[in-house]
Amino acid sequence: MNRAPTPLLIFHWAFAVFMLAPLVMVVLVSFTDKGYIAMPFDGTSWRWYRAILDAPDFIDAFWRSLALAAGAATLATLVAVPAGMAIAWNQFRGREAMLGLLLSPLMVPHVVLGIALLRYLTQIGASGTLWGLTAAHTVIVLPYVLRLVVAAATGFDRSLVQAAQSLGATGWTVFRRIELPLIVPGVAGGWMIAFINSFDELTMSLFVASASTQTLPVKMYNHIANTIDPLLASVSTVLIVLTLILMLVLDRVYGLDRVLGGKS
Amino acid sequence: MIAQRNVLPYWLTAPGVLVMLAFVVLPLVLTLSLSLYPFLPGGTIGDSMTIANYADVARDEYFHVIFLRTFGMAFMVTFICIAIGVPEAYVLSRLSARWRAVSMVIVLGPLLISVVVRTLGWAVLLGNEGVINKILMAGGLVEAPVKMMFTFTGVVVALVHVLVPFMVVAVWTSLQKLDPTIEQAAESLGAGLPTVLRRIVFPQVIPGVLSGGLIVFSLAASAFATPAIIGGRRLKVVPTTIYDEFLGNLNWPLGATLAVVLVVLVLAISLGANRLIERKFKQVFV
């Protein structure tokens, strides 16, 4: 394909600047030595990174979010892998309905899921508990894993399975030696995208988390509601760097374009 | 053996289906029913069914303004996302593989970064002491800072930034299916780039624009973090109003009612737009 013409390229770079500007700005203001957010500023310092270490509630929220995201992504993967394989490899009555049900959290606004789960967890006496929060996060990240598992499972050559069966492999052997290894990249990619989505989730968690189970985004949001100070910028910069590292890993494991392209 | 094979898919999907029934379907049904019970002064919920909450929302001008603002915002964001997302997806498809990989990370990478972080960036840019105002004043373009925080425009700009990647992905996916030889054929017959784009490329990516537009619209209408941070207390939208009713006024039935109305309106508008566009561009939706 031939090169894009110049006006389009100019548009493209303007677009890239638009996408990057707010993130670059957050990183820059995190290095201020002032007590408030100002751009441009004269002195640079690590002051606001040291301030993170003196903010135990942010650090607690960070570890809680990390554990929650890992737990929810793992639970969602354990549930989504068998379901994804069943849906990708079988025609059965109710298949479409089940796929729709399993993907349904994508269709419901998080603010609506938030109030629904707040009310529900209150009624079953689990409001504000960590396990209620974990269940809520598992549900909202499950579709992401399922989509990648279905995509990975649909993508491979079924004649491999037939070959193994014709050579006398049992169902379990076929699963363990052929099917599972072939969908592992999809499963790993799905786990990571679920992890990221759980870690970043704000709106639903605002309703489901209590003061003692605040996740990092909830903590940051509540902090912003009071004041926007450089501490938020330094915390955000740490998150941006961690996300970049995760993106590199994701790219190696599964291919960033395939994850972001989000084909179902 | 055959009977076993028929049952297995159900066993494999059962855990997921049960989890969804318990933590999505049941809570949503309970929310729907919650909206049909009255809120009594003192914070309790009455036990006779009523449509009073819906009547309140339908009558009160306060809610009309909020709903109009929310959907006006969502339409505006969708329109801008189409206007800039479609050309961007097209440029991406014309770049060399190496530049495309870099550009993809720049354009789609922000999807993986928390909305709180991205919105914070816009708060830094849009403030009265923010970078955009500093540049405008240094350049002598404006005398006094332009108010952008806590305005409709500010929220729209930040929401476009948050949601435009979805549009780019949707259009990019349908551009992948395009046959490049058709474009080449048009060019060899003397069509310039504008003609090729207007007559060949754009009609074929309409399904992608439609699905991207529906995603952006429904996410914009139900966005919470960006309107809450950039719009603030005064510029309320439906999701922030639901939040205030639930966690501020503790009027759960009214909050549930607003949520039901929001979901129904988003669904109705999406289905309507879908119908309209599929009918208008029948030939590309085969």
Image (cartoon, coloured by chain):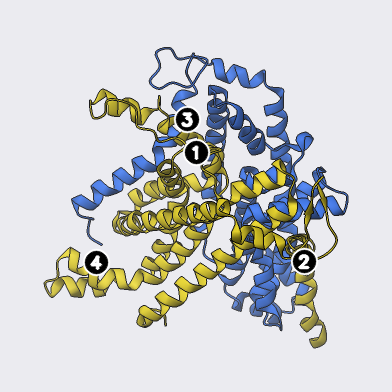
Chain colours: A blue, B yellow
Give the residue number, with chain letter if any, for mark 2.
B21
Q: Is residue B37 left or right of residue B254?
A: right
Residue B285 position within the rendered picture, expressed as x and y whole percent measured from the top left = 41, 79
- Marking on residue A26: 3
Q: Is residue A202 left or right of residue B276?
A: right
Residue A24 sits above or below residue A197 on the image: above
Nearest-to-viewer mark from 4 and 1 = 1
Whichever of callouts 2 and 1 sits on the residue coming sooner in the sequence is 2
Q: Quadrant of the C terminus of chain B?
A: bottom left
Structural distance between the alpha carbons of marks 1 and 3: 15 Å
Give the residue number, with chain letter if any, for mark 1.
B230
Say what amino acid the circle numbered 4 marks: Leu
Under circle 1, the secondary element is: helix
Say what amino acid the circle numbered 2 marks: Leu
Count residues near mark 3 (Cα–Cα under 10 Å), then give few for <14, some for 14-19, many for 20+. Answer: many
Give the residue number, with chain letter if any, for mark 4.
B197
